[in-house]
Amino acid sequence: MLDVKQIRERPVWVEERLQSRGGRHDLAAFHALEAQQRELRTRTEGLQARRNEIARLVGRMKSQGEDVSALLAEMGVLGPQLKESEAALRLKEEEVQQELARLPNLPAGDVPVGADEGGNVVVRSWPAGFVAGGATGENHWDIGERLGILDFALAAETVGARFTFFRGDGARLVRALTSFMLDLHTREHGYEEILPPFLANRESLFGTGQLPKFEEDLFCLRDDPYYLIPTAEVPLTNLVRGQIVDEARLPLKWTAWTACFRREAGAAGRDTRGLIRQHQFDKVELVWITRPEESMEALESLTRHAEEVLKRLELPYRTVVLCTGDMGFASAKTYDLEVWLPGAGRYREISSCSNTLDFQARRMKARLRRTVTKSVELVHTLNGSGIAVGRALVAVLENFRQPDGSVVIPDALRPYMGGQEFIRIREEKP
């Protein structure tokens, strides 16, 4: 959520930063609602002052034996007026907060300005000298079905579209990828592993910015006030909701594997085949809670940690800084990691690493207490995929497919696959 003080003191600058994101983001509705709120507050405070004055007068006049009937009559009229005004003020304050909740975060000053993904900027690629070409192999769904490790048809019969059964070596590869990532981040990058619930309440989803804007993309339970999480960012970041964290404990760094659930409401007709855009998928998430002055440096570290996964898997990728028009709602700056998929002949996003500054912290009331001054201020929060497991499996299948149809298992995963070096066609399918 944006800082109201900043909006009031620098309205033109805030408006310009919002408009750089494209879409219909402006402050007109906020200013109108806040003006109405000020009028109601002035009226309410005036009524409250008159009520208190009458109460004092009645007490004094009674002690002197004076007639207070006129004042009591005025109080009888004023009481309902005050009650009505207080109710209207509360409602208007809620409307102001709802309007604030609708506004996205402001892009950081060094984010390139652009209308859409065409304005994104590649900042580095790996390996050095790698040249992307056209489609040079099979798509992952053909490879997976031929090897008997992906079953889309059975999942469609059992559940519906955009679900998958991982079978045999496919299921084992998912488990290997997950364990490899968690071990890398906890043993070498200093994260604490968390296994959170896969459900979240409205307060948690509001805190990280999924609600109210993205409600249509969430799966909601019918009989209980819970949602299936769209990402582990939600439960991890909310570990500090309503908390005041001692500065000395920062940064906090958490990683978690979870299943993630998204309706993909805005992606009708896109990536209908394969694993790229599923309703349920696995992801290893990275979350940082930092001091404000350290968050941009933390974003660079977090992004490098996600990149290291791709390097260890020997998967070609590039790192892209998103422009203002392509960033997520809560982000102030985002790096996307895009892995090369030879079957598709294109780069595809496999990780998104973002600094939200104090945007989420303000919604969650997540704060730190400075060691020396004892002052309290908002923390900064960051999150990133470290990385999406299904898309990593896609990249392995397409990049390591061999001429005989088998798939080489990357060296980094072989200890998690019992030393197995290849995935080959299964002779029997139970």
Image (spheres, helix red, strand yellow):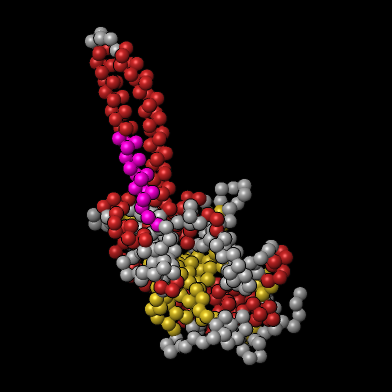
Compared with 283, 425 (above or below) is below
The residue positioned 32% from the left and 40% from the top of the image is 38
> Which quarter of the rendering shows the N terminus?
bottom left
Q: Quadrant of residue 14?
A: bottom left
> Which quarter of the rendering shows the C terminus?
bottom right
The residue positioned 38% from the left and 33% from the top of the image is 86
- Residues in magenta? 25-42
Compared with 191, 103 (above or below) is above
Indicate the position of residue 382 as horizontal and vertical percent values.
Answer: 40, 64
Indicate the position of residue 180 as horizontal and vertical percent values.
Answer: 52, 75
Magenta highlight on residue 32: yes
Q: Nearer the viewer, residue 274 or 225?
A: 274
Q: Nearer the viewer, residue 273 or 146?
A: 273
Magenta highlight on residue 413: no
Indicate the position of residue 358 as horizontal and vertical percent values.
Answer: 35, 58
Compared with 100, 183 (above or below) is below
Indicate the position of residue 122 as horizontal and vertical percent values.
Answer: 40, 78
In the image, taking residue 37 as reference, residue 160 lies left or right, namely right
Asked if residue 214 can be seen in this view, the reply is yes
Asked if residue 386 can be seen in this view, the reply is no
Is the magenta region chiefly helix, strand or loop?
helix
In the image, taking residue 213 as reference, residue 356 lies left or right, namely left
Compared with 66, 111 (above or below) is below
The residue positioned 57% from the left and 80% from the top of the image is 344
